Structure formats: C-alpha cells, structure tokens
Image: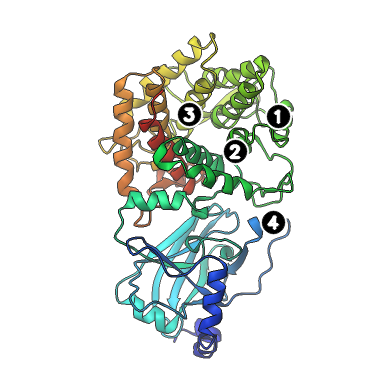
Amino acid sequence: MNSSTEPTSALTRRTFLRTSAVAVAASRMALGQTFAATAAMARHLPARVISAPDIPLPAGKREPFGWKTAAIGAVPLVLAWPDFPADAKPTAMRLTVGLDVRDEKLIEAYLLESGRVLGTFDVRFGCIFQVFEIPLAPADAADIRREGIALRLTKGAELRIFTEGTAIPAALQPHLLVPGTADAMTEYFARMDSLACVQAFSWQEGCVLDGLLDLAALPAHAALKEAARRQTARFVFGGKLIYENHVSAPSDGRMYGIEGTLPFAALAKLEPQSPLLEIALGSWAKKHDAEDAILDGQHTSSEGAYTVGYPLAIIARLRKDDALEKLALTQLRVRQARLFDGKMFWRTSEPHEGVVQKGNRAWARGIAWQMLGFARTLRELKHRTDLADCIASFQQLAAWVVPFQRADGLWSVFVDQPQLTPDTSGSAGIAAALALGAQQGWLDASAKAAAAKTLAGLQPHLTPDGFLGGIAQANKGGEGLQRGSYRVIYQMGMGLMAQLIAALETKA
C-alpha cells in the first residue's frame, strides 16, 4: 500500500462503517437527500466524510449559506458510502468547489486500502459551486463500496469542497453519479428546479435567475418562478443582503463591483418594492465616468451592458423614471462605441498612460454580454421612441457575429478562430440574444434559425444528469486557459441555455 495512505487505512474505514445505518438514513432524510429517486432519473450518491485534514478556513473568507466545506491537502480527505445501493453502477465521481480558486490544482482519488488510483481531478481557477468529475469504470463500484475513496492534493494549494449543510443538494456534495434512463433535457430541467444550479451572487447567479424567470413565463415551466424565489432567498435574510463576493469574502449589504449587480434584475421582477434595490442604485451612482458609463475605475467591459444596463432598465421602467431609462441606454451606447468598430469586438477597453488598451478580442462570452445587454435592455424599454440607434447597433453586432457560427451550431471561444475549442456558455448567450432579437422583430428569421442550431449543438454537452459542460473556464485564468481545450461544468451556462430555450419558445 502507498505509504501516504497508511494514516487513514482500514482501521478508520472499518470504524466508520460500523456507524448505525439508521442514523445515516435519518441524517439524509433530514436533509431531503435519500437514495430513493424516480426510477428514470439519475441518482447522486453523497459520500460521508470519515476524516479530513485540520486546515482552517482562510482568514477573511466565508462559506455560503452556512454550508460546510472540508479541505483537500497533502493529508488525504477520506470518504465512504456505508449504505451504497447494491444496484448502483456509478459512472463518475464528483466534488464541488466550496471556496474561490486562484491557481491550478490536481486532486488524486484513490481507493483507501489498495491505494489504486481511480483518477485525477483537474481543477484550474475553479469557481465556487463548480462541479468537477472523474470517470469511473464499471469494475470500480465494488471496490468503492468495500474500501471508500481518499482524495489528496498533488499540485497547488489546498482545495475546499462542500461536504454538508442544510438543504445542500446531493449533487453538490462529494458524490457518485448513477445515470438513469431519462433524457438529458429532462435531467437539465430537474437540475434547474433545484439548488444544484445555484451560483455566487454576481453575474453568475444573475444568468441563472434570468434563465429561471424566462422559462417560468412558459406554461410548461411556470414552477421555476418559485425556484428563482428560493435561490434569491438564499442571499436575503431579515431584509438584508448576505453574500460572498468573487473571492469568497463577506460582502454583506454592499456591492463588490458592477459585475455583481445583475441579480438585481431578478430581484426587481420578483420584489419590485424591495428596499435592497437601493444597494445597486447607490453603487451605480458612484461609478459614472465623464460619459455616464458606469464602470469599475476606468475599466470599460462588455459585462456592464448586461450586468448594469439591463437591471437598471427594469428598475427604471418599474419606477417610470425617464432619467434612469436614459442612463440604462447610455450603458449600451458607450460600450458599443468603445468596444466595437464594425469589424472587430473587444470585451474591454481601458486608458493606460494616454493610450487606450483593448483586450479579449472576439471573445465569445464578451460578445454575449454585449448582445444580451442590448436585447434584454431594449425589450424592457421598447415603449420608448428613441431606440433606433440602439436597435441598429444591435443589428450590426448580430450581423457581424452570425457568420462565425460553426457547423455544430456553436461559436469558438474566440469566435474568429474556428480552430479553437467552442465555448458552450458564450454560444448560448449569443444565441439567446439572437433569439430575443428575432422575437422582438429587430432581427429576421435567420437569427432565430441560428439560435435554434445552437440549442441543438448544446445538448450533446449535457451530462447524463443535465449539467452543461463544454464551458470555457472563468477568465481569471487568462486567455491562455481560454484558448486551450480545457472546459468545465458551469451552472451559469445552464442559465444562459435556459434564456435561449425560453427565447425560442416565447412570442413577442
């Protein structure tokens, strides 16, 4: 046996497996997580932690929702499945990031007694709530049932993963995936109607909430409005906003930046009179530049078209505030002027020593933010008579990007470089905007056809239990990580896919 596994070998495992089966079942029932499931649906078999390294939470960081995390370091984190169903044939093992990641990590999963390595989790610049998996062979089930699994870090700093917590879905705990017989789209809607698709309170959660509310407008998915309410309620306690920012630091009652304000669009729709809307309005009021673009510092990004322009438009419309409506449109106009010259699109623009520097040339997700900002903001403000130039700008950007669509219905991560791996999230966002434009009559039928082609192209990237894979990792890892073939499961992309589905099915 590998010497590094000796401290957590058979004795610990046997001690744990003597735990009362009744107590285990009662605990899982309390969390609403039993192994019982609709026969056709996938099952997520959550692990029980036997032992974990004694590594405290980093200073200034906080776990969301009171959920608990455990660290994976050089000392193994040991897991077992004491009531492993006899019929279970898992195809993958998964873990979920519980704290923001700023490096590249490798996590080796091995059988506790024999030391046989099952696989290695490749976690690069992971985001909280991201699910990572390794495949399992059919013969692994019996060994996992008998021995349990240990996880040890072989590269990078320790990784914290979710382990338990009130109402935490089994799909976000360390678990084994047992596919069912339901099709991937059925599973997708089941994941959307659960906390398995929750994201950090930021542009990421905003994508999910917008998708849920868009789908909820369709009779077949009306129940998803309550799913959106449940997710929003995870961040609001006693009338206060409680959340962690993009680096897992507590940011209660304030905004960490303009990318964090997108969820206020959903909040405004669900609770139009909520006093929490003043948090966003107050934050935006402090961030105007000379042209009234709302920015973090001098950094113009296409995200702001969607994360600022859109929620601002909703609040302005609800309050019948002409000045705020004009300010929302300004977010579109200024960004279009700074980021798109008719021939090329950049996600960012920022002055540096008297020279304007632009970045993320032709990045699919950056294009999606600009296009969604236009489509969703203009739809909110379609009662106005001064939208002609904005509609023309949206049409120009759509006409530029559609020819880059690949034969598989997707767009490459940098759209003008077809040799690169596609990004399903950027593709879903671009297509959702195209479908919204066609729905509103700003784009012709070819735009809707392109969007439908994208939806067909996304479905092969769904996991057997309906998570969306094939997504370019968060850009905190830089363009090098984006340009490679590394792709992840990422729930914000599921929200963008939901927006696409709804836009294709909804009439103006």
Q: Nearer the viewer, mark 1 or mark 4?
A: 1
- Which disc, if any, is residue 281? 1
Calculate the distance from the C-alpha at mark 3 to the C-alpha at mark 2: 14 Å
Residue 78: x and y, percent? 53, 77
Q: Which of disc 4 and disc 1 is earlier in sequence? A: 4
The amino acid on which the numbered mark 1 sits, given as a three-letter code, is Leu
Q: Residue at x 55, y 22 (%)?
A: 335
For the C terminus, the quadrant is top left
Q: Nearer the viewer, residue 88 or 426?
A: 88
Closest to the observer, 469 or 103 = 469
One can see residue 339 in this view? no
Q: Does 27 appear above or below 370? A: below
- Residue in view at x 56 percent, y 53 percent: 128
Figure check: 87 above or below 68: below
Which amino acid, by three-letter code, is at mark 3? Answer: Leu
Mark 1–mark 4 Cα distance, whole angstroms, equals 26 Å
Disc 4: CA contacts within 10 A as few (<14), some (14-19) or many (>=20): some
Q: Label 2 amino acid?
A: Pro
Q: Nearer the viewer, mark 3 or mark 4?
A: 3
What type is the residue that disc 4 sits on? Lys
Q: Which mark is residue 372?
A: 3
Considering only order in the chain, which callout, 2 or 1, is on the residue closer to the N terminus?
2
Using the numbered discs, state the Cα–Cα distance from disc 2 to disc 4 in whole angstroms: 22 Å
- Position of residue 371 in the picture relative to residue 330 (left or right): left
- The residue nearer to you, when weighing 186 against 251, is 186
Which residue does the numbered mark 4 point to in the structure image? 61
- Give percent across and percent down for residue 265: 59, 33
| Mark 2 neighbour class, 10 Å CA radius: few under 14, some 14 to 19, many 20 or more | many
- In the rendered view, would you say 491 is above or below 373? below
Mark 1 secondary-structure assignment: helix
